[in-house]
Amino acid sequence: MSEPPVERVNILVVDDRPSKLIAMEALLAELGENVVCVSSGADALRQLLDWEFAVVLLDVNMPEMDGFETATLLRRRPRLRHIPIIFMTAGSDETRALQGYSLGAVDYILTPVVPEVLRTKVKVFVDLYRTTAELKRGADERVALAAERAARATAEAARQRSAFLAEAGKRMARSLDLEATIATLLDLVVSELADAAVLRLRVPGQDIATTFPPGHPRSKSPELLEAMDEAIRSLRASTRGGGSEEETTRALACPVLARGATDAVLGLVFERGRPPLDASTVMLVEDLCGRAAMAVDNCLLYREIQDRDARKDQFVAMLAHELRNPLSVISSALGILESLGGSEDPAQMARRSVRRQLQSLTRLIDDLVDVARITTGKITMTLAPVNLRDSVQRSIDALASEKRSKHLIELAGHDTWILADSVRIDQILTNLVGNARKYTPAGGSIRIRVEPEGDHGVFEIDDSGAGMAPDVLAHAFDLFFQGDRSADRAGGGLGIGLTLARQLVELHGGSIQARSAGEGRGSRFTIRLPRCAAPVGDGPGSTAGEAAARPRRIVIVEDNEDARQMLKALLELARHEVHDAADGPAGIELTAAVEPEVAFVDIGLPGMDGYEVARRLRERHKDLCLVALSGYGQPEDRRKALEAGFDMHLLKPVDPDRLSAIIAELPPRRVGQVANGWIRGGLA
């Protein structure tokens, strides 16, 4: 390579991509200088040792020797220690940018670059090089030292700018709350750049205008705020979409672009004592607005996700409520028919079939609601000592009459006490036992083992049924996953039972594991739950049968005609004296007239809801046992029932046998506080 002409200044471009070198050479050709292009750090060092260069444009990401390594070697040479380096990279990483500035870089540019901006930056150092060369020829060392200090000041200013933007990005990313993020942005602007600031943001159905500092005299200055409004109006009227500066008003407005749209405008106001705005300040504000746009957009997306979750929860709660109301009527009607019908006639067989399907549908609704609660962290549990073996037996008994196909179910083991929510444990075990029966053909075997092992109680169920292939086993606990969607698996459910079982087990601090040797070779599920000591037995008391033999005076307040009449008929068959009302005011008057022992009150009454009815009844009837009937079963609904004065919260539909047991266990007089277990998941 021949020596370049003396009148031209050398510019070194280092990049491992030939296409990039060609593009950079063409971009810098307008400067009329000598552009030298090399493809590696080693070649760059050789060129720098042989020739003088005004500036080095150095790619960060190169094979063998990257830009930072090249710069480190370059700085070790005394003659090359102060040569200007401009790093170029496509990655936006504040930490790497600071690393570049620590090596003495004068700038850190993200690609693709704006040609005019890059040429302007390079020309600055070309001119600086020429000035320095003239000073050297004139032997004016003091002027040369000043030039060196100026270059260092430029690098320091660039470093400070990068540090400010990095800190701003971190502070705005700390919260997904929109108001907090806006406050952080305005605090950064006012503390570092301006005397007052405002952000105006348009979101669906809302136009937010936030001024900072709030309550500060300058933020209330009509002159400054008018200047800010004028700058913002100028920006919105502009079709160019860039920053707007008005020298006479001393204000600056900059768009905050998110997803290609100007949804926000940042306005800055400066007092007269501040120096005039320069290009670097405007660029700094534009960079800050770019980071602010990402932070604000993240906040808006998070708010949208929260709104969707809230709407989903409301939909699930309303769906469960609307389904439970007709199920409550069906449950009461079946209770009446079962009390009146014979045990051998076909009608009784039909009633048993309807009862089984009703129980299946009720469990399905409960599972759907519980999955929604768990995924949003809204489920609550009441922990107490539970005999795991008794829970298994209850689950087997509950499912015993659901199918005609018979299975040999073997239960082995010993009493095993765990610290758990009894209702949730029954729900887990019912899911697993029902799953084993569903996928085990008639005549197959189901073996269950319950044992204490170390600090855990172990439940293991092993069936000889369909089994699972390895790919199905890997997703057995995934929500809505079903291994076989063919027509012969029409009764396979929705794919939520095992997901719910795993989530409930983990909420108890336990673990669940599934195993299978393959299709047609059965499945095994093992649950481990924390053990606890067996509780001390309670003293003897009256039995439910003795209490059930005593009739009660009962009031029902329910607006649904079918539900009210069916529940009334069911209770009258049990020899209770029942009075009913269709709305809240009538129920209050009826209660005052008949002085009942128990009042069943629907929550969703028209006009005066069940909570208000309970509050008014509790003021007049201190000893009345109040029972809420509701299709809503969220923890918030139960809490509101307790606060309104209810003693119990029953979730529709209530099984007739369970209802009879509950009435039998109700105390004859209401005590000063709710007894342990009255308001709980099992009765709700």
Image (tube, helix red, strand yellow):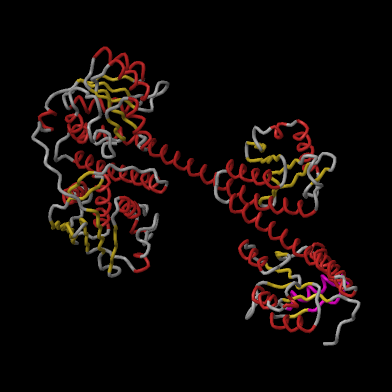
Label count reads: 0
Residue 24 is inside the magenta segment: yes
Residue 609 higher or lower than 479, as above or below? above
At 73% from the left and 58% from the top, the residue drawn is 157
Q: Is residue 41 left or right of residue 445?
A: right
Quadrant in which residue 340 is drawn: top left
Quadrant in which residue 529 is drawn: bottom left
Image quarter in which the N terminus is found: bottom right
Residue 173 higher or lower than 646, as above or below? below
Residue 493 is inside the magenta segment: no
Q: Is residue 338 left or right of residue 81?
A: left
Q: Which residues are magenta?
A: 18-36
At 70% from the left and 80% from the top, the residue drawn is 40
Residue 201 higher or lower than 584, as above or below? below
Looking at the picture, how far across and down is residue 274, in whole percent?
78, 44
**Visible residue check, residue 193:** yes
Between residue 516 and residue 30, name the one nearer to us: 30
Between residue 15 and residue 274, name the one nearer to us: 274
| Helix, strand or loop for the magenta stretch, by majority | helix
Q: Is residue 90 left or right of residue 412?
A: right
Between residue 682 and residue 235, name the one nearer to us: 235
